[in-house]
Amino acid sequence: MREPAREEWWLVAGLGNPGPRYAGNRHNAGHMVAGALARRAGASLRRDARRRVLAGTGELAGHRVVIAEPIAFMNLSGGPVAALASFHKIPPGRVVIIHDELDLPFGAVRLKLGGGDNGHNGLRSVSAALGTREYNRVRIGIGRPPARTDPADYVLSDFTAAERKDLPFVIELAADAVEALLARGLVAAQNQIHPARAAGPA
């Protein structure tokens, strides 16, 4: 039975591609963080074939949350996100999208509200489906590809062995960023998570 919609609910969605073939890819950083948040929230992510998501409900930072991993491919992420937001009556201002970011060094985590998609097909799809760019983003730095490497190939490759050693810390930091955003608001969360001298774009 559908739970009653409440104004304080949030939707937190981690972007990625479905299936084991893509599970360790840089492009799946959002899925990784959504899994960590589901564990923190005590949420069991279950397959919703109709909306093409794995989703569950729980509590983070004193708020009821829907945590989701779209299981459509990245460039079709917006449909599942918008369907969940509509079903639970959650406005875009209470949607948090977690995604990989080429223009941040590996391990950097940044928060922002709105902005462009910067070539990210998942963000482009979400913005189109929600009808606005004014939703929250938690950006996980994956760094730029080496010279002569196609960015499309780079994001669909796995993290290196050296990066995988630090990846659990990065995932937890991004999960902390989501909780800080819900608990304290965007500016306070940015002050908590961002370093005093940002290593990359805000």
Image (cartoon, rainbow, N blue to C red):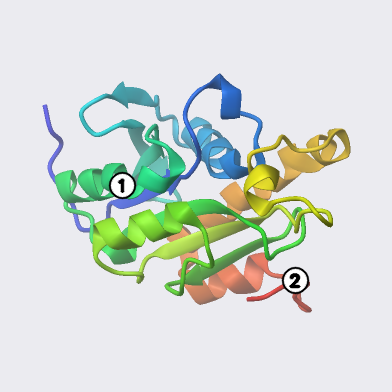
Q: Is residue 76 above or below residue 96?
A: above
1 or 2: mark nearer the eye: 1
Q: Is residue 57 left or right of residue 29?
A: left
Q: Is residue 110 visible?
A: yes
Residue type at the position of mark 1: Val
Q: Which mark is residue 122?
A: none
Distance between the Cα atoms at labels 1 and 2? 30 Å
- What residue do we see at 37% from left, 35% from top? 72
Dot 1 crowding, Cα within 10 Å, few <14, some 14–19, many 20+? many
Disc 2 on helix, strand or loop? loop
Q: Is residue 185 left or right of residue 50?
A: right
Query: To which residue does mark 1 refer?
Result: 81
Farthest residue to the front: give it. Answer: 148
Q: Quadrant of residue 156?
A: top right
Q: Quadrant of residue 22?
A: top right
Query: To which residue does mark 2 refer?
Result: 195
Q: Is residue 149 left or right of residue 88?
A: right
